[in-house]
């Protein structure tokens, strides 16, 4: 009976993962723990993209990040268009930036130092500095706390804020090609990765 119970507990842990990262008391410890957890996952070549997205979604608020990036035209989208674009955006981010950023912190970044850059209301910016070879690297995570659960809502690599970068790209494409053109371009980018 005990062995069966242990098996179920282990199975549930593997299925849902640890929620320990959500139990931390400050944003710096949250980013440190998220990076340690996701670095191991990002480094596993055999981990399918969908499973990595599932793990990342526990720590990132992709909806808030998409809202920041699409704020200039979001009201022009239908609910269906918005949902499709959010899903594509989530895939793009995890394949392009997030997986690379956490792999960088967990595997390649030497002497990572974590600090709180600023905090206002429920939003905080956590700075991670280190070296990559001879080059200094700086990552900034914007973290929001809702009901004592932290989520990452934006990421800056060497000063380039992810939401602003995508906001500029999205606006240019949306003005010329509309929502359908933006969706087509995002699908093409995904295929090229």
Image (cartoon, rainbow, N blue to C red):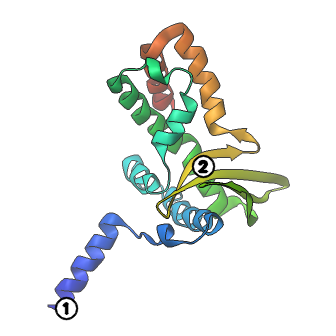
Tag 1 residue: 2
Q: Quadrant of residue 24?
A: bottom right
Q: Is residue 3 above or below residue 90?
A: below
- Farthest residue to the bottom: give it: 2
Q: Position of residue 101 (x, y in %)?
A: 62, 51
- Farthest residue to the right: give it: 134
Q: Is residue 119 above or below residue 86?
A: below
Secondary structure type for disc 1: helix
Q: Residue at x 72, y 60 (%)?
A: 109
Tag of residue 173: none
The count of marks equals: 2
Q: Is residue 193 above or below residue 131?
A: above
Tag 2 residue: 100
Q: Is residue 66 left or right of residue 154?
A: left
Q: Residue at x 33, y 69 (%)?
A: 14
Q: Residues within 10 Å of mark 2 (few under 14, many from 20)?
A: some
């Amino acid at each position: 009976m005990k062995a069966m119970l242990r098996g179920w507990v282990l199975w549930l842990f593997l299925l849902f993962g640890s929620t320990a990262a959500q139990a931390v008391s400050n944003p710096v410890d949250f980013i440190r723990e998220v990076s340690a957890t996701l670095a191991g996952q990002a480094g596993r070549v055999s981990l399918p993209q969908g499973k990595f997205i599932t793990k990342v979604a526990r720590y990132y608020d992709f909806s808030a990040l998409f809202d920041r990036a699409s704020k200039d035209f979001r009201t022009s989208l239908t609910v269906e268009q918005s949902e499709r674009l959010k899903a594509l955006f989530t895939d793009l981010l995890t394949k392009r930036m997030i997986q690379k950023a956490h792999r960088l912190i967990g595997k390649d970044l030497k002497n990572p130092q974590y600090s709180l850059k600023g905090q206002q209301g429920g939003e905080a910016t956590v700075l991670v500095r280190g070296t990559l070879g001879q080059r200094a690297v700086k990552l900034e995570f914007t973290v929001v706390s809702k009901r004592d659960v932290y989520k990452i809502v934006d990421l800056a690599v060497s000063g380039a804020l992810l939401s602003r970068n995508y906001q500029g790209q999205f606006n240019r494409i949306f003005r010329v090609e509309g929502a359908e053109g933006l969706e087509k371009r995002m699908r093409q980018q995904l295929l090229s990765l």
